[in-house]
Image (tube, rainbow, N blue to C red):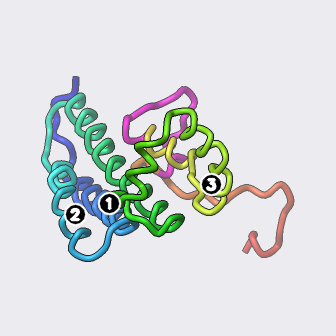
Amino acid sequence: MTTRPSPPRNALPACCVVGATLLALIALGHDGRRIAQLAVLAAPMVLWLAWPLRSTQTRRLRTLLVWLWAIGFALDGAVRAYLLDTYQAAPDSAMVLGAAANTNAREGTEYLWMHWRSEAGQRPFRADWTAWVLADLLHIRWNGQIPTRNVLSDAYRWQAPEMPVAIESFSR
């Protein structure tokens, strides 16, 4: 177990990136004062990223908890944006509450099965990008990984792609 504190150079960028992402996702489904209220509600977990921790396991647990917190806000914003865009209704409106109360699991599954293609086309979800980010956040490594080719690694160095054919404009 490593007992060195987490490097402070990564704390501020991590807080800024997570905070900006959360703010954008909150703004998807809310407006006005509600955006500020939810930003204040999300702030403690985001600021927790700046707190130095000695244990590697504690840092991983913190990363997981902050990720779960952010995903909760992301799902809330995405569902609210979907309801507003598709049905022009807030999630706490009588129409949405009545529909949810009168729907069973089979009907909900059928609805998702019918509409997932059109929604995926309009709002693509990058599963590959999400998997790479999660693997880096959880410090998952695999055999044969080259740190200098991993964009998320500190050892990353950009290398020009090697062309199988010599192209004059690239050789200058």
Contact between marks 3 and 2 (CB within 8 A): the answer is: no
Residue placed at 57% from the left, 30% from the top?
144
Splitting the image into 4 quarters, where does residue 6 fall? top left
At label 3, the amino acid type is: Ala
Give yes or no for residue 96 being in the magenta stretch: no
Q: Nearer the viewer, residue 77 or 94?
A: 94
User: What is the C-alpha distance between the residues marked 1 and 2?
Assistant: 8 Å
At label 1, the amino acid type is: Leu
For residue 64, side relative to residue 108 (left or right): left
At label 2, the amino acid type is: Ala
Q: Residue furthest top?
A: 1
Residue extent of the magenta highlight = 136-151
User: What is the C-alpha distance between the residues marked 3 and 2?
Assistant: 27 Å
Assign a secondary structure to mark 1.
Answer: helix
Q: Which residue is mark 1?
A: 22
Among numbered discs 1 and 2, the one appearing first in the sequence:
1
For residue 85, side relative to residue 137 (left or right): right
Q: Which residue is mark 2?
A: 39
Q: Position of residue 169 (x, y in %)?
A: 78, 75
Residue placed at 56% from the left, 52% from the top?
125
Q: Position of residue 32 (x, y in %)?
A: 26, 76
Q: Quadrant of the C terminus?
A: bottom right
Residue placed at 19% from the left, 49% from the top?
45
Q: Which residue is mark 3?
A: 120
Residue 123 image label: none
Contact between marks 1 and 2 (CB within 8 A): the answer is: yes
| Of marks 1 and 3, the one in the foreground | 3
